[in-house]
Structures are given as C-alpha cells and as structure tokens.
Amino acid sequence: MTVHLNTQTDLEDAVHALVRQDPRLAPIYEITGMPALRRREAGFAGLAHIVTGQQLSTASAGAIWARLSAAFDPFDHESFAKARAGRLGRLGLSAAKIKTLKSIARELAAERLNLDVLANEDADAAHNTLTALHGIGPWTADVYLLFCLGHGDAWPAGDLAVQEAVKIGLGLKTRPSAKEMAPLAEPWRPLRGAAAHLWWSYYRALKKREGVIGDVRKPNAVLNKALVAKRSSAKAKITARQKPGSKK
C-alpha cells in the first residue's frame, strides 16, 4: 500500500512510525523536531517548475518561472506544446529544457504518460517511468514524486544534502553515492519520503548550528560548552544505534 504525504498530519504520522521502525533515527528527530511538509503543484506545471530550476540558482530559477507562469493561462501541456521555441527562449528557458518539456507535453497529449497515476504506483516503478522521459534524471523524478505527488516512499538518493546528512547521522566515513543510498534506505520503506524530509531537516539543523558557532568571533564559553555537549550527546546516541533494531 502506497503512503501519501498530503498533509502535515500525514508527515507527522510517518515520521513517528519511522522512529519506531528504526531507532537510529530517534536522535536525529531529537535534533530536528518535526519537519515541515513540502508540497508543490502536481501535473505538467509542477514537473515543468522543477525542470526550469535545474542547474540554476534559486533566484534565477524563480525569476524564469515567474515569467513562464505569467505568460501562460493556464500553464498546461497543451498551451506549452503550442508555444514557439523562440518565445520560450526569450522567457528564459534553455534549448535543452525546451526540448525536454516539449517532449513531455507530447507524451501527455498522446496519453502515453499519465502523471497523476504515479502517486499510487510503487515508488521505484514511478521513478523509472519518469526517468524514461527525455531530459528527466533521477533527482528530478524523485523530487516530483515527493513534493508534487506526495509519494511517501520516494527517495531522492542523489540529493547531496540528504547524502551528507545520512553520512553524519549514521556515522559513515564518506558521503554515500546515489547507488549506496539505495540499500541504506531499505529499512525506511515504505516511508522513505518521510525519511528524506527528516534528513533534510537534520542537514539544515547541522549547518545552522555550525554556521552560528563559526560566525561568533568571541564565543561565550558557557554557551559554546553547552552546544558542544549537546552535539556530543546526540553523536553518542547515533553511534550506539548503528543498526536497525538495536536497543535504545
């Protein structure tokens, strides 16, 4: 049965189940607290939004998407298919992204692709359906499944922030590759999407903490000692829970 993360309550239930399922995640959750649900528009518009932002800064991607979404009413595969490449280029899309989105629009128009049904498919099968499309890589596929469709088992194995968080949280010597991330996430099925939310939150928590400490020119000794003690305690808990099912 596919789990859906459509509401914050769905995510909270899934995270609590994950912590019970894998005790190694308990100290991670202690640091992050409950993650906030991330959702985006589904359908062609949602996928186009992700493709538009590929390999761009957040600011650049946002500006291009604002122009694109304002230029089409509605923004759907039918209107996009009719748009000329020159116009799309002037709005900010690269030739490669125009080709990708035109190809997807044709697949949808021919009814060879149905994005909506992917929400109820096995996550790996849905991932393979998307990556079979021209210009859609693993990261784009997984982000679409997770954020646009709310697929509870989508696993963005190629996301660098998730990889780094898993490395630190599980006490690994090196950051795992996308291929290595797959077996690491097996204990979290069918809630790998919720696990991704948790690991993103952990990454942000660590970077924020490290940034604050690094920016303090004259650190308060008491505060600094407390922060170090808290991090050491969390690290000790993580180390003690290296395997699923280990005792607390």
Image (cartoon, helix red, strand yellow):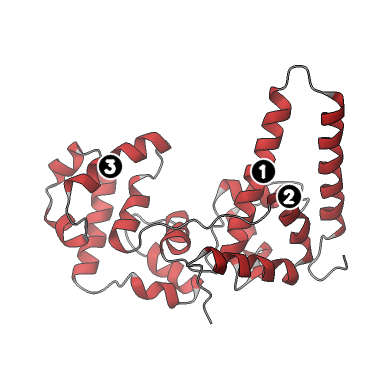
Q: In what element is the residue under mark 1?
A: helix
Q: Residue at x 43, y 55 (%)?
A: 140
Q: Nearer the viewer, residue 135 or 45?
A: 45
Q: Position of residue 72 (x, y in %)?
A: 17, 51
For residue 41, side relative to residue 73 (left or right)? right
Helix, strand or loop under label 2:
helix
User: Could you tell me residue 33's position as x and y percent?
Assistant: 68, 53
What is the CA distance from the residue labelled 2 to the residue labelled 1?
Answer: 7 Å
Disc 2 crowd rating (10 Å Cα; few below 14, some 14-19, many 20+) is some
First in sequence, mark 2 or 1: give its number. Answer: 2
* Three-letter code, disc 2: Ile
Seen in the image, is 123 located left or right of residue 43? Answer: right
Q: Amino acid at mark 3?
A: Ala
Question: According to the image, label 2 marks what residue?
Answer: 31
In the picture of the structure, the residue carrying the numbered disc 1 is 205
Is the residue under label 2 in contact with that under label 3 (CB below 8 Å)? Answer: no
- Say whether residue 102 is visible: yes
N-term-proximal mark, 3 vs 2: 2
With respect to residue 4, does 217 lie above or below? above
Task: Find residue 61 and report its image quarter.
Answer: top left
Q: Position of residue 48 (x, y in %)?
A: 31, 54
Q: Which residue is mark 3?
A: 66
**In the displayed structure, would residue 169 be above or below residue 128?**
above
User: Residue at the location (60% across, 69% down)?
Assistant: 191
Does any portion of residue 93 appear in the rendered image?
A: no
Residue 182 horizontal side relative to residue 26, left or right = left
